Image (cartoon, helix red, strand yellow):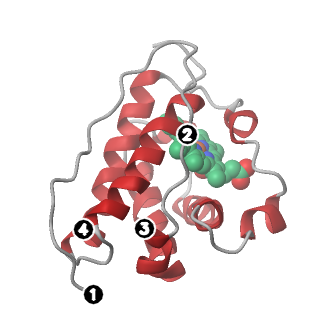
Amino acid sequence: MQFTTQALNFSIHPYQAGSRPPVTKPNPEFLQEIGEEEMRALLERFYTKLHQSPIREIFPPTIEEMKSAGDTSADFFIQICGGPDYFNQRRGAPQMVKRHAPFPITPEARLHWLCLFEEALQPIIKEKQSSEANIQSFWNYLNTFSLWMVNTPA
Ligand code: HEM
Protein backbone atom coordinates (compact mmCIF):
# COMPACT_ATOMS: atom_id res chain seq x y z
CA MET A 1 0.00 0.00 0.00
CA GLN A 2 1.31 3.49 -0.79
CA PHE A 3 0.49 6.60 1.23
CA THR A 4 1.31 10.26 0.77
CA THR A 5 3.77 11.75 3.24
CA GLN A 6 3.35 14.48 5.81
CA ALA A 7 5.50 15.36 8.80
CA LEU A 8 5.31 12.78 11.57
CA ASN A 9 5.62 14.37 14.98
CA PHE A 10 7.32 12.14 17.54
CA SER A 11 7.55 14.83 20.18
CA ILE A 12 7.05 13.69 23.80
CA HIS A 13 4.81 15.44 26.31
CA PRO A 14 6.81 16.51 29.37
CA TYR A 15 5.80 14.66 32.52
CA GLN A 16 4.05 16.66 35.23
CA ALA A 17 3.56 14.89 38.55
CA GLY A 18 0.02 13.65 39.06
CA SER A 19 -1.22 14.72 35.62
CA ARG A 20 -3.39 12.16 33.79
CA PRO A 21 -4.57 13.86 30.61
CA PRO A 22 -7.48 12.37 28.64
CA VAL A 23 -6.42 9.58 26.29
CA THR A 24 -7.73 9.01 22.77
CA LYS A 25 -7.52 5.45 21.46
CA PRO A 26 -5.48 4.92 18.27
CA ASN A 27 -7.39 5.09 15.00
CA PRO A 28 -8.51 1.47 14.29
CA GLU A 29 -7.27 1.97 10.72
CA PHE A 30 -3.71 1.64 12.07
CA LEU A 31 -4.38 -2.02 12.93
CA GLN A 32 -6.43 -2.58 9.78
CA GLU A 33 -3.52 -1.33 7.67
CA ILE A 34 -0.64 -3.15 9.37
CA GLY A 35 -2.55 -6.33 10.38
CA GLU A 36 -2.32 -8.43 13.54
CA GLU A 37 0.86 -10.18 12.40
CA GLU A 38 2.75 -6.91 12.02
CA MET A 39 1.40 -5.67 15.37
CA ARG A 40 2.94 -8.78 16.96
CA ALA A 41 6.19 -8.18 15.03
CA LEU A 42 6.20 -4.54 16.23
CA LEU A 43 5.90 -5.61 19.87
CA GLU A 44 8.56 -8.29 19.39
CA ARG A 45 10.97 -5.65 18.01
CA PHE A 46 10.08 -3.35 20.90
CA TYR A 47 10.57 -5.98 23.62
CA THR A 48 13.87 -7.09 22.06
CA LYS A 49 15.04 -3.46 22.27
CA LEU A 50 13.78 -3.14 25.87
CA HIS A 51 15.80 -6.25 26.75
CA GLN A 52 19.01 -4.46 25.65
CA SER A 53 18.10 -1.06 27.10
CA PRO A 54 19.02 0.93 30.21
CA ILE A 55 15.55 0.10 31.61
CA ARG A 56 15.86 -3.68 31.17
CA GLU A 57 16.01 -4.22 34.95
CA ILE A 58 12.32 -3.53 35.45
CA PHE A 59 11.42 -6.14 32.79
CA PRO A 60 11.66 -9.95 32.86
CA PRO A 61 15.30 -11.11 32.74
CA THR A 62 15.38 -13.58 29.83
CA ILE A 63 14.77 -13.00 26.12
CA GLU A 64 12.26 -15.88 26.12
CA GLU A 65 10.23 -14.18 28.86
CA MET A 66 10.51 -10.87 27.01
CA LYS A 67 9.14 -12.45 23.82
CA SER A 68 6.22 -13.82 25.78
CA ALA A 69 5.68 -10.38 27.42
CA GLY A 70 5.77 -8.79 23.96
CA ASP A 71 3.07 -11.16 22.79
CA THR A 72 0.87 -10.28 25.78
CA SER A 73 1.41 -6.60 25.04
CA ALA A 74 0.48 -7.25 21.40
CA ASP A 75 -2.80 -8.76 22.65
CA PHE A 76 -3.46 -5.47 24.39
CA PHE A 77 -2.48 -3.23 21.47
CA ILE A 78 -4.59 -5.28 19.02
CA GLN A 79 -7.53 -4.86 21.38
CA ILE A 80 -7.05 -1.12 21.99
CA CYS A 81 -6.83 -0.62 18.21
CA GLY A 82 -10.29 -2.12 17.74
CA GLY A 83 -9.28 -5.74 17.05
CA PRO A 84 -10.36 -8.91 18.90
CA ASP A 85 -10.31 -8.64 22.70
CA TYR A 86 -7.42 -11.10 23.13
CA PHE A 87 -6.12 -9.32 26.22
CA ASN A 88 -9.45 -9.48 28.05
CA GLN A 89 -9.83 -13.15 27.11
CA ARG A 90 -6.34 -14.13 28.26
CA ARG A 91 -5.56 -11.71 31.10
CA GLY A 92 -8.84 -10.12 32.17
CA ALA A 93 -9.64 -6.42 32.50
CA PRO A 94 -6.71 -4.25 31.37
CA GLN A 95 -6.40 -2.05 34.52
CA MET A 96 -3.12 -0.78 33.13
CA VAL A 97 -2.22 1.59 35.95
CA LYS A 98 -2.76 -1.17 38.53
CA ARG A 99 -0.78 -3.71 36.47
CA HIS A 100 2.17 -1.30 36.24
CA ALA A 101 2.13 -0.46 39.97
CA PRO A 102 4.66 -3.20 40.98
CA PHE A 103 7.29 -1.71 38.63
CA PRO A 104 9.12 1.53 39.47
CA ILE A 105 8.39 3.66 36.38
CA THR A 106 10.20 7.01 36.54
CA PRO A 107 9.71 9.92 34.08
CA GLU A 108 13.12 9.03 32.63
CA ALA A 109 12.16 5.36 32.16
CA ARG A 110 9.09 6.59 30.25
CA LEU A 111 11.35 8.58 27.90
CA HIS A 112 13.48 5.49 27.18
CA TRP A 113 10.31 3.43 26.66
CA LEU A 114 8.89 5.95 24.16
CA CYS A 115 12.19 6.37 22.26
CA LEU A 116 12.48 2.59 21.84
CA PHE A 117 8.87 2.40 20.65
CA GLU A 118 9.66 5.07 18.06
CA GLU A 119 12.62 2.98 16.87
CA ALA A 120 10.44 -0.15 16.68
CA LEU A 121 7.92 1.76 14.51
CA GLN A 122 10.55 2.67 11.90
CA PRO A 123 10.06 -0.36 9.57
CA ILE A 124 6.31 0.40 9.43
CA ILE A 125 7.13 3.98 8.42
CA LYS A 126 9.85 3.07 5.92
CA GLU A 127 7.78 0.34 4.30
CA LYS A 128 4.70 2.59 4.28
CA GLN A 129 2.58 -0.10 5.92
CA SER A 130 0.26 2.54 7.36
CA SER A 131 -0.64 6.13 6.58
CA GLU A 132 1.32 8.72 8.51
CA ALA A 133 -1.93 10.07 9.99
CA ASN A 134 -2.65 6.65 11.51
CA ILE A 135 0.93 6.18 12.73
CA GLN A 136 0.60 9.63 14.30
CA SER A 137 -2.62 8.58 16.01
CA PHE A 138 -0.87 5.49 17.45
CA TRP A 139 2.05 7.62 18.65
CA ASN A 140 -0.27 10.18 20.25
CA TYR A 141 -1.87 7.36 22.24
CA LEU A 142 1.51 6.09 23.47
CA ASN A 143 2.69 9.60 24.27
CA THR A 144 -0.36 10.45 26.40
CA PHE A 145 -1.20 7.12 28.04
CA SER A 146 2.44 6.50 29.05
CA LEU A 147 2.11 9.58 31.33
CA TRP A 148 -0.42 7.56 33.34
CA MET A 149 2.08 4.75 33.96
CA VAL A 150 4.69 6.92 35.72
CA ASN A 151 4.53 6.00 39.41
CA THR A 152 7.98 6.81 40.79
CA PRO A 153 9.74 10.19 41.12
CA ALA A 154 12.93 10.79 39.09
C1 HEM B 1 0.93 3.54 26.53
C2 HEM B 1 1.48 3.12 27.66
C3 HEM B 1 1.64 1.67 28.03
C4 HEM B 1 0.89 0.59 27.68
C5 HEM B 1 -0.36 0.56 26.81
C6 HEM B 1 1.50 -0.58 28.30
C7 HEM B 1 1.03 -1.87 28.16
C8 HEM B 1 1.46 -2.94 28.90
C9 HEM B 1 0.84 -4.25 28.92
C10 HEM B 1 -0.37 -4.65 28.10
C11 HEM B 1 1.52 -5.01 29.79
C12 HEM B 1 1.22 -6.47 30.17
C13 HEM B 1 0.40 -6.47 31.44
C14 HEM B 1 0.05 -7.85 31.94
O1 HEM B 1 -0.01 -8.78 31.17
O2 HEM B 1 -0.20 -7.99 33.14
C15 HEM B 1 2.60 -4.20 30.31
C16 HEM B 1 3.52 -4.63 31.22
C17 HEM B 1 4.60 -3.90 31.61
N1 HEM B 1 4.89 -2.61 31.26
FE1 HEM B 1 3.75 -1.41 30.14
N2 HEM B 1 2.60 -0.19 28.99
C18 HEM B 1 2.73 1.17 28.87
C19 HEM B 1 3.71 1.95 29.40
C20 HEM B 1 4.79 1.48 30.08
C21 HEM B 1 5.94 2.26 30.47
C22 HEM B 1 6.10 3.77 30.19
C23 HEM B 1 6.79 1.42 31.11
C24 HEM B 1 8.14 1.67 31.72
C25 HEM B 1 8.99 2.56 31.29
C26 HEM B 1 6.17 0.10 31.13
C27 HEM B 1 6.70 -1.03 31.75
C28 HEM B 1 6.04 -2.23 31.86
C29 HEM B 1 6.55 -3.35 32.65
C30 HEM B 1 7.83 -3.36 33.48
C31 HEM B 1 5.64 -4.38 32.50
C32 HEM B 1 5.72 -5.82 33.14
C33 HEM B 1 6.53 -6.72 32.28
C34 HEM B 1 5.80 -7.03 31.01
O3 HEM B 1 4.85 -7.83 31.02
O4 HEM B 1 6.17 -6.42 29.99
N3 HEM B 1 4.97 0.18 30.48
N4 HEM B 1 2.53 -2.96 29.75
Q: Position of residue 118 (x, y in %)?
A: 31, 52
Q: Mark 2 sits on what residue?
A: 23
Q: Mark 1 sits on what residue?
A: 1
Relative height, residue 54 to residue 126 (above, below): above
Q: Residue at x 23, y 46 (%)?
A: 9
Could you say which disc has been placed on residue 137 in the image? Answer: none
- Tell whether 25 sits left or right of 14: right
Question: First in sequence: mark 1 or mark 3?
Answer: 1
Question: First in sequence: mark 2 or mark 3?
Answer: 2
Could you say which disc has been placed on residue 125 in the image? Answer: 4
- Tell which tag, 1 or 4, sits nearer the viewer: 1
Question: First in sequence: mark 1 or mark 2?
Answer: 1
Badge 4 vs badge 3, beta-carbon distance below 8 Å = no
Ligand 1 location (quadrant): top right
Residue placed most toward the observer, 127 or 7: 7
Q: Is mark 2 within 8 Å of ligand 1?
A: no
- Label 1 amino acid? Met
Q: Mark 3 sits on what residue?
A: 42
Q: Position of residue 56 (x, y in %)?
A: 47, 42
Q: Can residue 60 be seen at all in this image of the molecule?
A: no
Residue placed most toward the observer, 152 or 48: 152
